[in-house]
Amino acid sequence: MFLCLRHLVIRRQPYRKFYLSPNNFTSTKFANFPKSNRFQRSPAPSPAARSPTDGHSFQNLSPLGDFVSVSQIKQKLTKCGHIFEEGHACLILDCFLCGQANSKLYINKVTGDFICFICRKSGVWSQLEPHLSAPSDSPISLDQSIELGCSGWYKISKHLCPVGRLTEEERISVSQLLDFEDLPWNILESQGVMFDQENQDLYWPLSLPEGGSTAGYKILSRDLSESCYPHTSANGLVRLKSPGPSKSAIIVPSLRDLLALSFRPLDGTDVVCLPHGPLSLPPLVLPLLEGYEKLTFWFNDDVTSWDNARLFARKLSIDRCHLIRPSKEHVTAFVAHKRGMNIAETVRNARAMSHDSIITFAQLREDLHSELYSADRLTGIKWQRFPTLNSILQGHRRGELTILTGPTGSGKTTFMSEYSLDLAMQKVTTLWGSFEIRNQRLARTMLQQMACAPLQHHRDKFDEWADRFTLLPIYFMTFHGQQQLETVLDTVRHAAYVHDVAHVIIDNVQFMLGMSSSESGFLDRFYRQDALIGEFRNFATTYNCHVTLVIHPRKERDGESLSTNSIFGGAKASQEADNVLIIQHKMSNSGLKIRKYLQVAKNRFSGDLGVIPLEFDKDSLSFGAKNLQ
Ligand SMILES: Nc1ncnc2c1ncn2[C@@H]1O[C@H](COP(=O)(O)OP(=O)(O)OP(=O)(O)O)[C@@H](O)[C@H]1O
C-alpha cells in the first residue's frame, strides 16, 4: 500500500571503493581536486532505486558502476584526445555524444556523472568511459538517457493559460494575492509564466541552457508557498538575464525575490532562483551555474537557509561565493524592494564565504555578528510536538551527534519516527536508515503520526495524507538486516552531497556490528562500535549534518534506570555524543502502570539536563503534543 509514497529510496549497490575524504585530500593523487569538492566518493544507486518523481536527477540515473577520481577522469579524457575545461564543479567538453554545435558535456567532479543538455544524454562515468575512444561516427547508445520534459504535464496544463491572456481584473487579483502591487507583468510574460485558473497558482518554467528547453516548473501558490513540478526532479533554473554578458549572479530562494530584483537590474549580474529554494541544490543544477565567476547568495536569515548557503557554496566552489549575511537590517530581496531600500548597496556589501587558512578576529567578528542576529542558528530548529525538549535541548542543530537508547521494545523507533517527522515537517531534509523494521512499516508509522489518526479507520483519507507526506523531504535507505559500515557510510555521504541531507538516523547501530557472540567476538563488536561512532562523528562534523544513532543498552535489569554508562559498547559512545537521550521506564506508585519518560542525560550545547514524560497515544502512535494536523 505504501508503494505509492513516492519518496526516493536509496539502495546501496556494490562498487569499487574509492575515497576522497578531507583526510586524504593532501595525497598527490588528489592534489588537483578543488578545495570546494572535498567530498568522499559516493555509491551509485541502482535504476531500481529511482522513484517515479526523481527520474531526472544525476543520482537517480546512476546504475551500477565503478568510481574514479577527478584526476583519473582527466587522465582518461586526455588520453582519448578530448580537450576539456576545468569548471568550478564540472569538467566541461564539447559533447562528442551528439556532436551538435555548441553542445557541452558536463562531468561532475565529485560524482563523475555526466549530462549534455542538448542531446539529453546523462548517466554515470562508467557508462561514458567506453565511448571516450569510440570513433565519432560510431553509433553511441547509452543505457540511460533522460527526457527532461514532464510526462504528466498534460494533466495540469488544461487549467493553465499564459499570463498575457489574463484580464485586468485577474491581474489585480493575482497582484493582491502575492502582495506585490507593482508586479512586473512584462517579465512574467517574457518568461512564459502561466496561470492556473483553477488553483490560482503561477507556473514558472525552469529553463535549461543551450537548447532552451523546459526542465519543469516552479510553482508560486496563492498561500505564497513555492514548490516544483515534477516535485523533486525539476532541476532547471529561473533566470533573469541582465542585458549584455554577465559573469556574476545573485541567487535568491523565491520567485518574489527574483521579481523584486528585476526592477533595478545590476550591470552584468543575472538573478537566479533555485528550483528548490534554500532546501536543496541537486547536482544537475551545478552545470547551469558554471559560467559565473561570482555568485552571491541572498537567502533568508532562518537557520536552514543559512546552513544550506554554506553547503551549496561548497558544491559550487566556495571561492566564487559571496553571502549577504543576516544582520539587524537583514530582509529578503522582496522586502528590500517593498521598502525601497538600496539593493545595489546591499549586494555590494555581500562578503566572501571563503576564508584563508589563517584568519583574524576581525574576520570572525562578521560571523559572530550574523550569528547573534539569527538566534535560531545558535539554538537550532524547534520541535512542534516536543516543547519540553526545546526548553532542554534548545533545538535541533546541524553537525551534532545524538544517541538514543532505551530498553528493548520501549518505543525507540516509534519516538525517533515522530521526532524526525516533526523536523522534516519543518523542512529538515532527513535520511532514514531503518535496519530493523522495513521501510513500509516505518513509513506507515510516520504517516499515522503525521495524520494523528489510525490509518485503518480512515482509508478514504489515505491519498490525501499520502500526498501531503510525499512533499516532506524524507529519504529512506533500503538496507535491511546486517550491513557493512562502509557500505552505509558511502550511501550517507552520497545523500549528503546529492540531497543536502541535514539529519541522518541510523536505527540501530547493532546492525553494522556483525553477529558474533563469542567472547572475542564480543570484544570485536565493542571495537567496531567505537570505530562506527568515530566515523559517524566525523561525518556529522565534516558535512555539518546531524546524526542520530539508536543504540541498544548494554544491560537491562528490571526496575533499574539506565544511564549513559548503560549504552552498549565502551565509553566512546557517550563521550563522542553531543546529546544522549534515554527512554526510561518507571513503575507507578501503585505498581500497576509503567510510565515512560525521555531523559536528556547529556547535552553538550547548554548542559541542561532533564526529563520529558512520554504519554503514548495508540491511535496516532504518537508521544508528542496532540491535535497537530
Ligand atoms: N509507550 C508505549 N506504550 C505502548 N506501546 C508502545 C509504546 N511505545 C511504542 N509502542 C509500541 O511498541 C512496539 C515497539 O516499539 P518500537 O519498535 O518503537 O520499540 P523499540 O524500542 O525501537 O524496539 P527494539 O528494542 O526492538 O528496537 C510498537 O508496536 C509501538 O507501536
Image (spheres, rainbow, N blue to C red):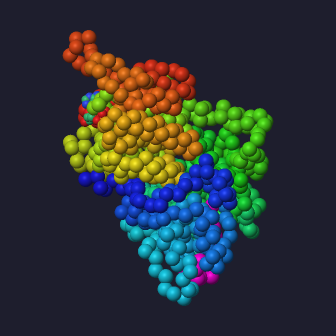
426 relative position to 405: left or right:
right
Q: Residue furthest front?
A: 520
Residue 627 falls in image quadrant: top left
396 relative position to 339: left or right:
left
Q: Position of residue 56 (x, y in %)?
A: 46, 65
The residue lying toward the viewer, choosing from 423 and 228, is 423
Q: Position of residue 184 (x, y in %)?
A: 63, 59
Please determine whether, in this image, residue 49 is positioned above or below residue 331: below
494 relative position to 312: left or right:
left
Residue at point 47% right, 46% down? 429
Q: Position of residue 525 (x, y in %)?
A: 39, 38
Q: Residue furthest top?
A: 589
The residue lying toward the viewer, choosing from 19 and 328, is 19
Dominant secondary structure of the magenta stretch?
Answer: loop
Residue 399 falls in image quadrant: top right
Please determine whether, in this image, residue 540 is positioned above or below residue 27: above
Residue at point 63% right, 52% down? 25
Residue at point 47% right, 61% down? 16
Q: Position of residue 363 (x, y in %)?
A: 76, 39
Residue at point 78% right, 37% down? 360
Residue span colored magenta: 89-101
- Viewer can see residue 207: no
Q: Quadrant of ligand 1?
A: top left
